Structures are given as C-alpha cells and as structure tokens.
Image (cartoon, rainbow, N blue to C red):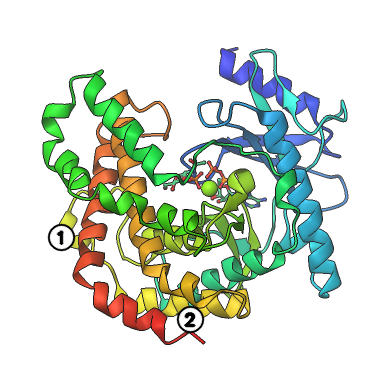
Amino acid sequence: MAQAEQTLHEVLEAFDFGAPVVRAIRYGCGHINDTFVVHTQPEDRCCRRFILQRMSSAAFKRPDQLMDNIIGVTEFLGREIEKHGGSRSREAIEVIRPRNGEPYYTDSQGGAWRLYPFVEGTVCHQAADTPELFAASGRAFGRFQRMLADYPADTLYETIPHFHDTEDRLAKFKAAVAADKLGRVKECQPEIDFVLAREKDCSVALNALRAGKLPLRVTHNDTKLNNVLMDETTGEGICIIDLDTVMPGLVLYDFGDSIRFGANHSAEDETDLSKVNLDVDLFSAYTAAFLEGTGGSLSNTEIEYLPWGAKLMTLECGMRFLTDHLEGDTYFHISREGQNLDRCRTQFKLVADMEKHWNELETIVKQYQK
Ligand code: ADP
Ligand code: GN1
Ligand code: MG
C-alpha cells in the first residue's frame, strides 16, 4: 500500500463513523487543507457523509490552538443559532472527536486530522452566477459577523500571525523578490512593479486602526463564496465553514475578501484577463446584503472604508499568490505550474478595475451611512 493510502486507512480507523466506511475521496476546491468526503453505509438508513480534513502544516503551525478556536467558535455559534430558533446541526459545523477523545487525530507521519458531519441539502458555489446568490452569501457572512459580536476575542489564538497585516505581507513579498529562490523574478516584473506602485495603500486600513478610527472585531477573514454552504432549495446561505482564520480583525477584511472572489465572472486562475472584470452591480448587491446581515452594527467609518477593504484584500491576495510563486508554491495548492502567477494576475486586474470604478464604489457604500 502506498504511504498516502496507508495513512488515510490509519486515520479512518481512528474515528468512529457509526457504520462501515464505503469510500473516502478527495473533495472540494479549497487551496489550503486536504479535504476528503467519507461515505458510510449504515444498515438501516441511506449513506451518511462526513468531511475529513488534514490541516495544512504549511499554513497552521499549532493545530491544537487552531482546534481550540474552532471548538470554541462552533459551540458559541450553535448556542446563538438555537437561541434564535435555528437548526444547530445545519447552520453550524460541529467537530466530531476521534476515538481517543482529543479534538483531532495526529497520524503516525505527524499529520493533524479533523472530522465534521457533511452538511446535507446544501450547495457550495465556486462563482456568483446571479446577484441573488451573491447577496445570499453576503447576508450569511454579515449575520456571522453579528452573531460573533459578543464572542470573547481574547480567548482566540492567532492561528496565522499577521494574517491580514498588509504591511507585513508587503515586507514578505519584498523578501521573496530579493531572494528570488527559483529565478522567477525576471518573468514577473510587471506584477512586481504593480505592487511597488501601491506600497502606500498597504497601510491605509492599518493606519485607520492605529488611529482608533476602526475597531477590531471577531472576523472570519476568509470569506470566499466557497466558504459558505447554500440551501439547495431556497438558495439562502446556511452554514459558514472554513473557520480556520476566525481571529480579531477589521470588518472590512470580511467584506473585502468576498468582493475579491465573488464580484466578477471569472475563475481566480483565469488566464484570459479580458474576462476578468469587477462587476459593480455584484458589488452593490453584496454591500446591501452584507449590511442587512450585520443588522446596522457597523459605524459610518467602517462603512466608508468598505471599498478599501475590497481593494486591499485583492491587492494583498495577489501579493500572497505572487510571493508563493516566487518561493516555489509551498503554501497554496496548485494543479499546474504557473497557477499562482495566473491567480496573482487576476487579482491585480481586479485591483486596477476597482481603481477605475472607485467613485462608484464610494457612492454605493455612502447610501448606507446613518
Ligand atoms: P480549505 O481551507 O482548504 O478551503 P474548507 O474547510 O473550506 O478547506 O473545505 C473545502 C471544501 O470542502 C469547501 O469549499 C466545501 O466544498 C467542502 N466542505 C467543507 N466542510 C464541509 C461540510 N461540513 N459539509 C459540506 N461540505 C463541506
Ligand atoms: C485560501 O482556504 P481557502 O481555500 O478557503 C486562503 C485565503 C485566500 C484564498 C485565496 C488560510 O482560502 O486567505 O484568500 O485561499 N486561506 C488561508 O483563494 O490562507
Ligand atoms: Mg475554504
């Protein structure tokens, strides 16, 4: 048996699925963790599914702290959902412990694995085909933000230090350019120049935070469309997943990352940049829905900075893709060579588009100031 297969076998044995496992196959489009869907066959019922994940060791140095955060947040959300008459098992993910009672299982090769029930009757979208769908995701992420308003932020570990510290991301990017480990700098000069022309932008949100203009809240920090499960019948956003980066942050990170990924009609790694364009109508639909979800809890200054959230998350993500490309693709999963550079290029095209439409974006968010 190959090592990978042997490890998966060991891990499947470590959990009690309540019925024989029929198969375990790779699943989803996440860039970070190794995700499998596990099918079981109970005798008297139809197949039950689970999500089994090996947490990325490149991204997460302390799986114990990561799982501590996730258990704390999912239990808190579960209580909030029940308080408001919702269904805990459908609207919040739930950690299933391995047989040894720990929050996760460490395999003999050192990999850290966790298990969740598969949330059935939901769909995970990779693109926002309609404004309604995108708005539904915005309402769900807005609600998520409001539900966590009273979560004790000081109990959260920083699972990835400086995650949305755009100044730090810029410094790491410059270090990767200087090191030029794989000799790839020569093929990325236009992208490098694009970042260097926007160095000052990297400090805009952090300056506002340091000046006390924007508050820290408990934020998700990775609000792409494929991190919310939508009801397959009603299309509403049901369950927010991928809670690995729930940490104190600015609300504009959550707003901005959704816009980055969803307010356009192309794949994140599209190679034909003429197809990559910011859709201002999608931006507008998301803004209305996100602010509906947050239930009026944001200050006028937070609302004013939302376009900056969109631009900064997109610029930062492009920088991260480029950094990873220069360093040899050790962080984001790739399925072909050059994919991180292609991802970087789509992000920078979107940043340029946001700059072109800046006045419109500001006018859209202004309507919601009190
Ligand atoms: P990554 O950090 O690698 O993005 P995610 O936690 O987002 O990992 O999981 C990857 C994909 O697996 C998701 O985009 C979604 O399609 C699917 N998924 C994750 N958790 C569940 C769940 N509990 N129920 C159904 N699908 C899930
Ligand atoms: C990663 O985990 P996933 O695939 O939902 C990354 C995000 C990036 C995103 C780009 C923990 O998200 O920060 O914005 O890829 N997650 C982590 O698609 O680094
Ligand atoms: Mg994900």
Q: Is residue 224 above or below residue 283?
A: above
Kindly identify which residue carries mark 2.
288
Q: Which mark is residue 309?
A: none
Q: Residue at x 32, y 76 (%)?
A: 361
The front one of 1 and 94 is 94
Quick one: label 2, few (<14), some, or many (20+) residues within 10 Å? some
Q: Is residue 129 above or below residue 216?
A: below
* Quarter of the view holding residue 3: top right
Q: Tell me, yes or no, if residue 231 can be seen here.
A: no
Kindly identify which residue carries mark 1.
274
Marks 2 and 1, the one that precedes in the sequence:
1
The front one of 138 and 114 is 138
Q: Residue at x 26, y 59 (%)?
A: 350
Relative placement, left or right, of 177 versus 46 is: left
Q: Residue at x 42, y 74 (%)?
A: 304
Q: Tell me, yes or no, if residue 174 can be seen here.
A: yes
Label 1 C-beta lies within 8 Å of the nearest ligand 2 atom: no
Residue kind at label 2, given as amino acid type: Ala
Q: Secondary structure at mark 1?
A: helix
Relative placement, left or right, of 233 versus 155 is: left
Residue kind at label 1, given as amino acid type: Ser
Relative placement, left or right, of 340 versus 93 is: left
Can you name the residue that lies furthest to the front here?
Answer: 211
Q: Position of residue 75 (x, y in %)?
A: 81, 53
Q: Position of residue 265 (x, y in %)?
A: 31, 65
Relative placement, left or right, of 85 versus 157 is: right
Q: Are marks 2 and 1 in contact (CB under 8 Å)?
A: no
Q: Disc 2 and disc 1: Cα gap in Å?
A: 28 Å
Quick one: label 1, few (<14), some, or many (20+) residues within 10 Å? few
